[in-house]
Amino acid sequence: MRLKSAFSFLPLFASIYAITPLAVDMYLPAMPQMADSFSTGISEVQWSLSIFLAGYALGMLCFGPMADHYGRKVFLLGGLSGFLVTTLALAFAPDIQTFITLRFFQALFGGAATVVVPGTIRDLFGKSTAKGMSYVSMAMMIAPMLAPTIGSIILAWSEWQAIFMILTSYAALILFFAIFRFPFLPARSQSHSNVIYSVFRSYRIVLLNTSCLPFLLTTMLTTFVFFTYITSVSFVYITIYGVSEQVFGILFGANVAALMLGNLINARLVNRFSPIQMLRMGLLSASIVTLFLTWILIHQASIAYLIVSIFALMASLIIVSTNSDALVLISFPRQSGTATAVIGSLKFGGGAFSGLILSWLYDGSAAPVALVIGSAVTIIILLHLAIRLFKLPIPGTN
């Protein structure tokens, strides 16, 4: 397929990918109201978020290899259909236990739907996978930026159930377009007809590919930094620097814009250079910015310096992450769904671990944040220095 034709699918791919951040973030403003509605504590409602993340990771792990085996479109349509039904059911959940159970299945189906997207991009774009992934990532980042605001607007004129009704309508719309517009790509021929055997074989192929291991770890560590930022940024801005909640909202949105800018820069330049060159340029920039950010956080330097350094770090690391993902996906033309599942699971695992480490190191200052971010970026640097020093193979460049 010509690259120009492949680009026509990107809006649909981004819309499918956006169902997860919408499902995660749209109901956040409604949590206190939901706790009252279910006559339970806020912690029980918050537990539904952790359950969703676990279900989403499990869905990717289960359905990624199966999509490689049977073909992607059937799992996309099945996942979207299941997501639609469970989201509608969430609006009528009678108690918190039912709500949490439905959230798990909503996430499971969401994982089945979204896990097919990177592999499809890989099949359509080939060596330009990093370019396609950059545009999809840039577009779908609008969802987490707008989702809490959308949820708040809905709550201004209705109850929390309306949030899930709106999300159901979105899923129905995406399902409609996916039926007619999502490209049909036949399943790759398999050497064994048994799906269980094929699933384990696919995971063995991906996980034992030593040239991809540093790039999988890079993906995990960059996401670890992103989640460290998300977990700690309100504490740093509001508690340490004393900004208002309104100003914090603007600053948070600006850093989502930084992620979009990083993806735009990568999409424009990656064909001129290469994914590995873009990754290294992003990592060099992130290394310099991390040193500056560490000094700022430890010495509580001017907030202007903090704003600029976080913006630059987010833009740099998304370039590193996007190209790292692309290099892994390019390496597995027959197991791209499995590779996507591994990448996604590592990202969610790294993200969950960041909050745990921050809670262990908490001392009332911003120093632990600097330590965690600095350590993660340092490990990424050491990984890629080792690749250069020992002349390790670069995936997708053979």
Image (tube, rainbow, N blue to C red):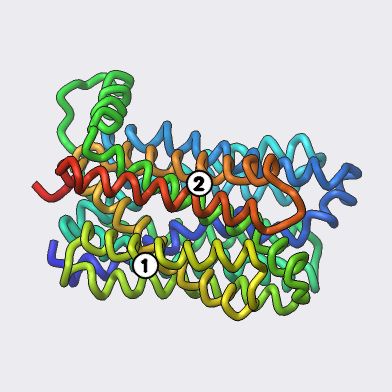
Distance between mark 2 and mark 1 Cα atoms: 34 Å
Q: In the image, 365: left or right of 40?
A: left
Residue at 8% in and 46% down: 398
Image quadrant containing the N terminus:
bottom left
Q: In the image, 44: left or right of 36?
A: left
Decide which of tag 2 and tag 1 comes sooner along the chain.
2
User: x and y percent of residue 11 in the render?
Assistant: 37, 68
**Mark 2 and 1 residues: CB-CB less than 8 Å, in contact?**
no
Please tell me whether mark 2 or mark 1 is closer to you in this view. 1
Residue position for label 1: 285
Residue at 22% in and 45% down: 387
User: x and y percent of residue 357 in the render?
Assistant: 62, 41
Q: What residue type is disc 1 on?
A: Ser
User: x and y percent of residue 232 in the render?
Assistant: 66, 57
Q: Is mark 2 on a helix, strand or loop?
A: helix
Residue at 27% in and 60% down: 280
Q: Is mark 1 on a helix, strand or loop?
A: helix
Does residue 219 show up? yes
Above or below, comparing residue 15 to residue 54 in the picture: below
Q: In the image, 334: left or right of 117?
A: left
User: x and y percent of residue 173 in the render?
Assistant: 49, 63
**Dot 2 alpha-carbon crowd within 10 angstroms: few under 14, some 14 to 19, many 20 or more:** many
Q: Which residue lies furthest to the left in this view?
A: 398
Quadrant housing residue 287: bottom left
Above or below, comparing residue 185 to residue 268 in the picture: above
Query: What is the tally of numbered marks visible in this picture?
Result: 2
Residue position for label 2: 110
Residue at 47% in and 62% down: 290
Q: What residue type is disc 2 on?
A: Gly
Quadrant housing residue 12: bottom left
